[in-house]
Image: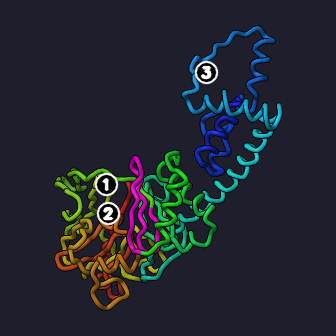
Amino acid sequence: DADDNVETFFMHLLRGAGMKGLAGIKPVDGKFIRPLIETSREDILAYLKKNNLDFCVDSTNLDNVYFRNKIRNLLIPCISKNITGADFKKRIANTIKILREENDLLSQLAESFINDLKTASSIGADGKEVQGKEPEDEKTGKKGTYGRGIGGGKTCGKYLEIPLKKLENYPDAFKKRIIISAIEKIKGTSEDIKSISLDRILKFCFSGGESKKIKFSGDLNIIKESDGLAFFLKREKKKKSLTRYAVPQEIEFAGAGTWSRIASENGNETTLALKKLKLKFVSKVIAGNLNTIKNKRISDREAYLDYGKIKFPVFVGFYREGSGQKFVPLGMKNEKKLHDFFIDEKIPKSMRSEIPVFYDREKVIWLGGYRIDERARLDDSTKKIFNIKIIKI
């Protein structure tokens, strides 16, 4: 009833809550509907008496050892009797309603900010960026299943990143709202996040140092890396998982640092499914050259490579820190370490071990989701195209 909301207001006020906490209990909150939350206890008791309806009282409601009972039995009667008068609760209820409306507006604005991070960029066949919404997953039709990091911000499954340059443009109060919205997007709730925690996050994300990390209760992790603030759930340690080809052949895949064959030179379409990571890699050979796909919009989860420049077989694995692997990024002339490429592209350390790396017998040919190797690019002399796709399963 409305009295519960007044009690909740004072409980949160005395504990140091912000507007979100002071906005009280909502009449409708997701699947929960509270039809009597704005009806006073006095009116409910009057209705029961008028209609001769029995009711029971929880005996613990009279025990002032509980915080809520102290508010109900001691604080509210004292204020009502000695300071404000009988309509005290109605005025508090009206204040709660005003705070709730303002809180809902700020929440909607913060959620809109987070949703705007879903834009990403793709690399076209000619090496130029193509701007637009993230491509849909080919199987589920859902957006944001696998894609590029940072830049304009990134949301991807249980990972979300906010560019600090965008965040710093707002007052601290709205920065906190954005952080709350990000946590809710990743975790589903922000109930365990206190005001002091938000102050701590703001302090560490705008202080010096390239990489910092906060772990919260449960599985929530927040990392500041370079110019981005990343939110993600702690992942289970990767275990060995069975991988399968479309051809009748099975191998074991052990995670980061272990390489698995994805394609041979025969040109048959091949599928490698890593069920533990919920990814599938599909490769095939297509007749044609650069002009064949020149006007095609290419997702960052797809690569078109010159078949004649690849030394088969092709393998796929995941980046391992300190491996010293190198490649020649598309558009460049000299080799660059993958580690240095990640730093230049502002890809968080927390994401690097989950980036698939495709290579042949001599070189890396594609850093999955980011850049192909210059030495495997298409040109006018290309006769056959080797196509690889990353698909969420």
Q: Residues within 10 Å of mark 3 (few under 14, many from 20)?
A: few
Q: Nearer the viewer, mark 3 or mark 2?
A: 3
What residue did someone put label 1 on?
A: 277
Q: Hey, what amino acid is under mark 3?
A: Leu
Q: Hey, what amino acid is under mark 1?
A: Leu
Which circle's residue, 3 or 2, is located before the other in the chain?
A: 3
What residue did someone put label 3 on?
A: 62
Q: Secondary structure at mark 2?
A: loop
Residues in magenta, as a range: 209-230
Q: Hey, what amino acid is under mark 2?
A: Glu
Q: Is residue 277 left or right of residue 197?
A: left
In percent of width and height, residue 357 lies at 28, 70
Residue 354 is tagged as 2
The CA span between labels 3 and 2 is 56 Å
Which circle's residue, 1 or 2, is located before the other in the chain?
A: 1
The CA span between labels 1 and 2 is 9 Å
In percent of width and height, residue 222 lies at 43, 60
In percent of width and height, residue 46 lies at 79, 17
Q: Which residue is drawn at the image coordinates 18% and 79% (left, top)?
A: 362
Q: Nearer the viewer, mark 1 or mark 2?
A: 2
Q: Are marks 1 and 2 in contact (CB under 8 Å)?
A: yes
Q: Residues within 10 Å of mark 1 (few under 14, many from 20)?
A: some
Q: Secondary structure at mark 1?
A: loop
